[in-house]
């Protein structure tokens, strides 16, 4: 029964991502900077680290489902977020077996994961011809601000969900 809370939280985060741009100061919104909320992805990293064990793949299943849901709701192309989230969560899931689950490692996995996810999305949009932004501009105006803003979100939700996810998994 407790494992139902993670999908409910993911669903709530998808809804909140739609209004996240409204929470940003006008100075940022009107500038060239583009910040993309990857709150679902960040929570998926937490699920992979604190809810999953070696033989469970809840985070990967949730990445497929909620990545596709994000594609349906927010993008013109189906599968972009689903593929990006699933590949990256699979990588995190494999590496977490090697490292200890703590805040520092969660921060590292999240930063690397955000870098991978956003680059996969960028490359897919380049491949379908949806954008023509050079990588140097993309990295300066979208990638770095996106990673920084999402790390702030991680710092806010980490203490709230770390122990809850561990207790839902039975690891505590």
Image: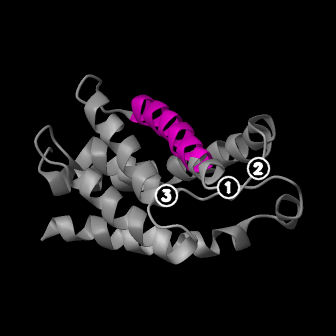
Above or below: residue 123 compared with residue 125: above
Q: Nearer the viewer, residue 153 or 145?
A: 145
Spatial CA distance of label 3 from label 2 is 17 Å
Name the N-terminal-most of marks 3 and 2: 3
Mark 1: few, some, or many residues within 10 Å (few <14, many ≥20)? Answer: few
SS at circle 2? loop
SS at circle 3? helix
Marks 1,2: beta carbons within 8 A: yes
Kindly report which numbered mark, 3 or 1, lies closer to the viewer in this rendering: 1
- Which numbered disc covers residue 132? 2
The quadrant in which residue 65 appears is bottom left
Decide if residue 160 is on the left or right side of residue 155: left
- Which numbered disc covers residue 80? 3
Spatial CA distance of label 3 from label 1 is 13 Å
Q: Which residue is mark 1?
A: 129
Question: In this picture, which residue range is highlighted in magenta?
Answer: 103-123
Above or below: residue 112 compared with residue 23: above
Give the percent coordinates (x, y) of residue 75.
57, 70
Residue at (18, 57) in percent of width and height: 168
Residue at (47, 39) in percent of width and height: 113
Q: Nearer the viewer, residue 164 or 133?
A: 133
Decide if residue 9 is on the left or right side of residue 153: left
Give the percent coordinates (x, y) of residue 83.
41, 52
Q: Nearer the viewer, residue 93 or 138?
A: 138
Residue at (72, 73) in percent of width and height: 22
What is the chief secondary structure element of the magenta stretch? helix
Which quadrant is home to the N terminus?
A: bottom left
């Amino acid at each position: 029964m407790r494992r139902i809370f993670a999908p409910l939280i993911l669903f709530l985060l998808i809804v909140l991502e739609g209004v996240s741009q409204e929470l940003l100061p006008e100075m940022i919104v009107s500038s060239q900077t583009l910040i993309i909320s990857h709150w679902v992805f960040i929570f998926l990293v937490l699920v992979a680290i604190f809810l999953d064990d070696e033989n469970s793949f809840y985070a990967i299943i949730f990445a497929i489902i909620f990545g596709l849901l994000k594609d349906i709701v927010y993008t013109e192309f189906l599968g972009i977020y689903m593929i990006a989230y699933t590949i990256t969560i699979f990588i995190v899931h494999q590496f977490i077996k090697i490292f200890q689950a703590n805040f520092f490692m969660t921060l590292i996995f999240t930063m690397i994961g955000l870098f991978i996810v956003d680059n996969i999305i960028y490359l897919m949009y380049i491949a379908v011809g949806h954008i023509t932004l050079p990588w140097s501009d993309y990295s300066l105006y979208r990638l770095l601000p996106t990673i920084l803003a999402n790390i702030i979100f991680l710092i806010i939700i980490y203490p709230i969900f770390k122990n809850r996810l561990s207790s839902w998994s039975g690891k505590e």
